Amino acid sequence: NAGVTQTPKFQVLKTGQSMTLQCAQDMNHEYMSWYRQDPGMGLRLIHYSVGAGITDQGEVPNGYNVSRSTTEDFPLRLLSAAPSQTSVYFCASKKAGGPGGELFFGEGSRLTVL
Amino acid sequence: KNQVEQSPQSLIILEGKNCTLQCNYTVSPFSNLRWYKQDTGRGPVSLTIMTFSENTKSNGRYTATLDADTKQSSLHITASQLSDSASYICVVSVIARGSQGNLIFGKGTKLSVKP
């Protein structure tokens, strides 16, 4: 059982470039989310989705876009990368929205913007 | 503002010793409290989830406690092993959703177990 799969694991971008971080889950979870983790800070929510076709902004959405065309996939797009977006990005999923349910994380994507 | 504070920030212990990590929260309305273990370079993995009515829950050598009255939780690790070296993250769920979503994350405690 693969769980939550993120690609790529590592990426280096130049300022202004765009890219997409991929996230896929095989647990038929309705809820999917993207977090960023920076040194000395807790995980911060970027965007989330409670089902296919539904997305919403989290705490730090600026500079990022998401879409949810299928239950399995939830890609995160960086429109014009900035050095402030250098971070480790985690995709996570759980069975449904709301406060309950175990949250499963991917292994992370480490992004460096020069 | 909903907040989760963890202490200490970092901790070094010798293999075989016990330790306790603390989590204080100012979150309302409270739904549940979770502890995650995050190995270096990996994603967080769930250790325990406790609801309002539960005051203790164990997962092997990990025991979490919850005092909903004082809004405090602790994670006790018994007979530590080198593989326990990791960051431990306390996460509190709220019933009402805000921009942070339902989950409020602490900054974590970095535990190092030395031989």
Image: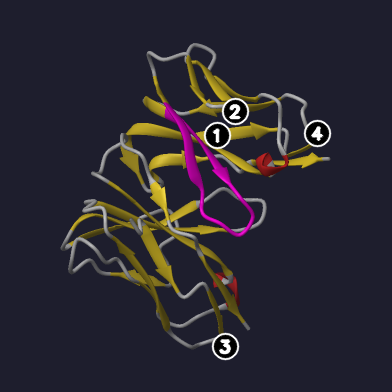
Circle on res. B110: none
Question: Please, what secondary structure does the residue beneath circle 1 have?
Answer: strand
Q: Quadrant of residue B19?
A: top right
**Residue pictured at 80% horizontal, 33% vertical:** B13
The reply to whether callout 2 and callout 1 are in contact (CB within 8 Å) is yes
Of pointers 2 and 1, the one earlier in the residue sequence:
1
Q: Specify the subunit that label 3 lies on.
A: A
Provide residue B74's location: percent of width, then percent of height: 60, 23
The reply to whether callout 4 and callout 2 are in contact (CB within 8 Å) is no
Look at label 1 and name its amino acid. Val
Q: Is residue B55 left or right of residue B107?
A: left
Q: Specify the subunit that label 1 lies on.
A: B
Magenta range:
B33-49
Circle on res. A14: 3
Question: Please, what secondary structure does the residue beneath circle 2 have?
Answer: strand
Instruction: Rate crowding at label 2 as few (under 14), some (14 to 19) or many (20 or more) other CA atoms within 10 Å.
Output: many
Give the alpha-carbon distance from disc 2 to disc 1, as whole Å.
7 Å
Nearer the observer, B80 or B98: B80
Question: Please, what secondary structure does the residue beneath circle 4 have?
Answer: strand
Q: Quadrant of residue B90?
A: top right
Q: Nearer the viewer, mark 1 or mark 4?
A: 4
Provide residue A6's location: percent of width, then percent of height: 41, 67
> On the same chain: label 3 and label 1?
no
Look at label 3 and name its amino acid. Lys
> On the same chain: label 4 and label 2?
yes
